[in-house]
Image (cartoon, rainbow, N blue to C red):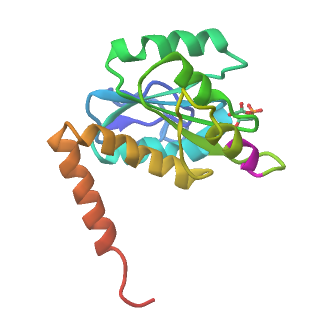
Amino acid sequence: MVARSKTPRARTLRPAAKKPAAKRPVAKRRGGRVRVAILMGSASDWSAMQAAADVLEQLGVGVDVRVMSAHRTPDRHRDFVTRAEGRGIEVIIAGAGAAAHLAGVTAALTTLPVLGVPLEGTPLQGLDALLSTVQMPGGVPVATFAIGKAGAKNAGLFAAAILASKDPEVRAALAAFRRAQTAAVPERP
Ligand code: RP5
């Protein structure tokens, strides 16, 4: 049993905190070595980005979840990203809304695979973030996913697929996830 906080933070496995359940909900979580970083431009992005963390934890992949913005906290962002590979991070997921440059700037600072998740929440409902994330000029790639929660979930699954190419345990977890997903689809409504 590990603690799950409402606000994003470094989510490594740690003992459950002794705080009232209402303030710090506790959930069962599987998690392994931290191999994926999940970045978001604002704590307000967490409601969507949590889907990436949840699916990776379900697959037994440890995640480090951070709030950092390429424009509001540029030093925090640069420090984290430039040290990520040395800390054992293998994939970075970056979610942001509006003029979403977090994924692109992240990709500029590392050669790790960067998976971008455009987020809604502006009058343009994520279309702004989608175009900002997907339209990277040639040379610095960002793999871009769907807007919002579905994109965050798929970015988590895709990160696992990247790890699975060299890790039989993650490969097996991913295959089991797909089997369970298929089995959950009813033949009739
Ligand atoms: C982006 O601006 C963030 O990723 C967020 O989606 C959006 C709005 O941020 P807040 O004003 O809610 O902090 O940088």
Tell me the quadrant of ligand 1: top right
Image coordinates for residue 99, horizontal then vertical, percent: 75, 34
Residue 13 in sight here: no
Question: Is 148 contained in the magenta span?
Answer: no
In the image, residue 120 sits, relative to residue 17, either above or below, namely below
User: Which residue, as the protein is rendered here, is positioned at the far front?
Assistant: 138
The quarter in which the C terminus is drawn is bottom left
Q: Residue drawn 17% across and 43% down?
A: 169
In the image, residue 146 sits, relative to residue 144, either above or below, namely below
Magenta residues span 125-129
Horizontal placement of 116 versus 45: left or right? Answer: left
Snapshot quadrant of residue 167: top left
Q: Residue drawn 33% across and 28% down?
A: 35
Question: Is 127 contained in the magenta span?
Answer: yes
Q: Residue drawn 53% across and 9% down?
A: 79
Image coordinates for residue 52, horizontal then vertical, percent: 46, 44
Horizontal placement of 116 versus 129: left or right? Answer: left
Image coordinates for residue 141, horizontal then vertical, percent: 52, 32
Image coordinates for residue 150, horizontal then vertical, percent: 53, 55
The quarter in which the N terminus is drawn is top left
- Predominant secondary structure, magenta span: helix
In the image, residue 48 sits, relative to residue 99, either above or below, namely below
Snapshot quadrant of residue 27: top left
